[in-house]
Image: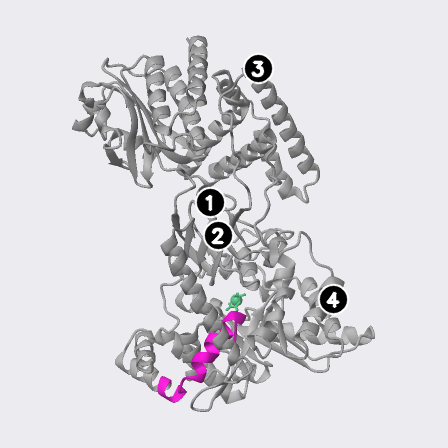
Amino acid sequence: MAERFETESRKLLGRLRDAMAGDDPGQARLDKITHLIANSIGCEVCSIYLFRDEETLELCATEGLNPDSVHQTRMRLGEGLVGRVARSRQVVNTADAPSARGFRYMPETGEEVFSSFLGVPVQRLGESMGVLVVQSKQAREFSADEVYALEVVAMVLAEMAELGAFVGEGAAMGARHSQPVMLRGTVAQEGVAEGHIWLHEPRVVVTNPIADDPHRELERLTEAVEELRVGVDKMLTLAADKEQAQVLEAYRMFANSKGWMRRMQEDISNGLSAEAAVEKEQSLARARMGQATDSYLRERLSDLDDLSNRLLRILTGQGADTGAEMPADPILVARNIGPAELLDYGRNLRGIILEAGSVGSHAAIVARALAIPLIVHAERATLEALNGDHVMVDGEQGIVHLRPDDTVVTAFRDKMAMQAAAVERYASIRDKAAETLCGSVISLHMNAGLMADLPSLEGSGAEGVGLFRTELQFLVRNQMPKRSELSALYARVLDAAGGKPVIFRTLDIGSDKVLPYMKPNDEPNPALGWRAIRVGLDKPGVMRMQLQALIRAANGRPLTVMFPFVAQYEEYTLARAEVDKAMEREARLGHVLPETLKVGAMLETPSLAFSPQKFFEEVGFLSIGGNDLKQFFFAADRENERVRRRYDTLNVSFLSFIERIVERCNQTDTPLSFCGEDAGRPVEALCFAAIGLRSLSMRPASIGPVKSLLRRSNLDEVRKVIADARHRGDMSVRPAIMDYLRDQG
Ligand code: PEP
Ligand code: MG
């Protein structure tokens, strides 16, 4: 039987290919296909349902149902048996369809006379495209071989649909990748950008889903798998450590998996090409991955997915180098990307769209440093986008307009022009002080983390670098940077700053920032775990090396250093003692010491705000790390999309807390600044200034807007608005401030 079916399925695929070979319009092709399948399987009905939009399936061709219902009958995802197949991406096979769970009677199709129903998902690489159905009057369950044959055909249909085979007169389906698509995501770096798509990992296109010669296809598969195995073995010999080797071992196990190989060989015997066989198994694995709740299983399925991709690249010869040329205005699309890869692209990119990623990821830090608009969590981006597609990224709203139509293009360009005008307006106040109408002067600094940030010092009008995040140099490498490298880099930063002050923050790792070459620590709560200064003090080697590098970089110039995440007085004194020791050591070694040395701490945990007076007297300066401080104040994870924005920075309790810190610093004359992201939001910055902060550090692009608002504001009035809101018992002062600003025009 299996043998008979193998040849049947192969014959069917052969006929399908012939049907596709002509230059019939898309609808005619679909009609022919349903006719062929119904005949081959010996059923009265064969129908193809394709997605009209993400939620709606449409009957696009049928043999056996009422022809008038084609393009008329529609169902929502999950509705009826067809909708159930599409939603679950699993086969439904029943001898008694009317009694099956989810059956819905569609009078226009006349289908009530058909008892048996077999529906298989049409999917490509886990992406659902529609449903292929056969039905018959005779009540019978379809055999495993029949189900298999239909799955193979569905796979080929998906490939053909991907290649645009069903597009054209009669509009069987819209041309994929030609319609405008709007994707929603989360903003990780603001800004607007227009450009053309550059796929980090181009889609593999399979142009030959049906095998001409199964023997040849089997050979091709064997050769490709062999090449894959050799590649994995080679990676194993290069593995940096035991852990990496363990991961690769699991990988190798898959590459040698007999089951995987056997299934692909069967697919080929049934008429698929080697590529299509790999894709078929990959699709099944992806569908399972979507349903797996066990994280171990999900990871293994993801290994398999990765291996399948490699295998497809070997088979199609479509590697990273596809010969495509990067557009002049590239907007990068990827599932996810590491910081080092992103730095390789550098400032060439106009924008970045990621399917995964997170606001606090390393990639986001790099994107921010390079001031490239970044949208994360943009689902389906890699499925919808093709190299070279026109795209507009709205990094204010978190929207991606792919292949936008003219009205969107016009509206978007207006928006960009307005922003450009604003930038020009800000340029005109670049060299002016951020002096408010009531005569207070706020000093505005910029945050940085890369050499590439430094040119902004000039352009933004920042008075200096209020936060230089040194961890990026550690994060983007495969091994610990050398002291000489760091020292050279810090020296270049100081050179580029040209005498403007730079506050170097010592290594802030742990939590979300994990060094690739450090043994990861499995901590139940990394944000509350072994991070930042805690690592620095427990393993002082790296901290000492970094302090030495900083002193040498200063080479007689002023040096300012601050320690991240200080939670109690003692941590500061211990860290400060390390600085003193480093100075003594450097002096002994004959190095020139900095002209002046300031050592400060970041206030990122509420505890530090309540430390003894002596701490405030002793510390050189304090900088509020609002991103962390806010997450600990509200106990709301800054990385968790569900709760990240739940509490307003202008919440009266939080503002009162910051005001308390300002008062304590005023009592001891301790210089204080604020360097979290909120400092760069004009309304927040205005409130901070009103409650007494006189120094703010932010993204360079925020300096213009913040300065512009400060220069037009009277802090006495703002203070009164805040006091009134507090008096009324408002939860947040934002509504009152916004009303006030509106009244001010
Ligand atoms: C902060 O926590 O506010 C801060 C500036 O540091 P980071 O965002 O690097 O943790
Ligand atoms: Mg922090």
Q: Which residue is mark 4?
A: 488
Q: Are marks 1 and 4 in contact (CB under 8 Å)?
A: no
Expressed as whole percent of the image width and height from the top left, the position of residue 628 reads: 48, 67
Q: Please tell me which residue lies in front, 293 or 704.
A: 704
Q: Which comes sooner in the sequence, label 2 or label 3?
A: 3
Q: Which residue is mark 2?
A: 353
How far is disc 4 from disc 3 in space, using C-alphas? Answer: 60 Å
Expressed as whole percent of the image width and height from the top left, the position of residue 661 reads: 46, 80
Q: Please tell me which residue lies in front, 546 or 618.
A: 546
How many badges with numbers are in the image? 4
Q: Dot 2: what SS?
A: strand
Q: Residue at coordinates 39% horizontally, 59% vertically from top-left?
A: 410
Classify the position of the N terminus by image quarter.
Answer: top left
**Label 2 CB sits under 8 Å from any ligand 1 atom:** no
Q: Which comes sooner in the sequence, label 1 or label 4?
A: 1
Looking at the rendering, the stretch of residues picked out in magenta corresponds to 696-718
Identified by mark 2, the residue type is: Ile
Identified by mark 4, the residue type is: Ala
Rendered view: 715 above or below 523: below
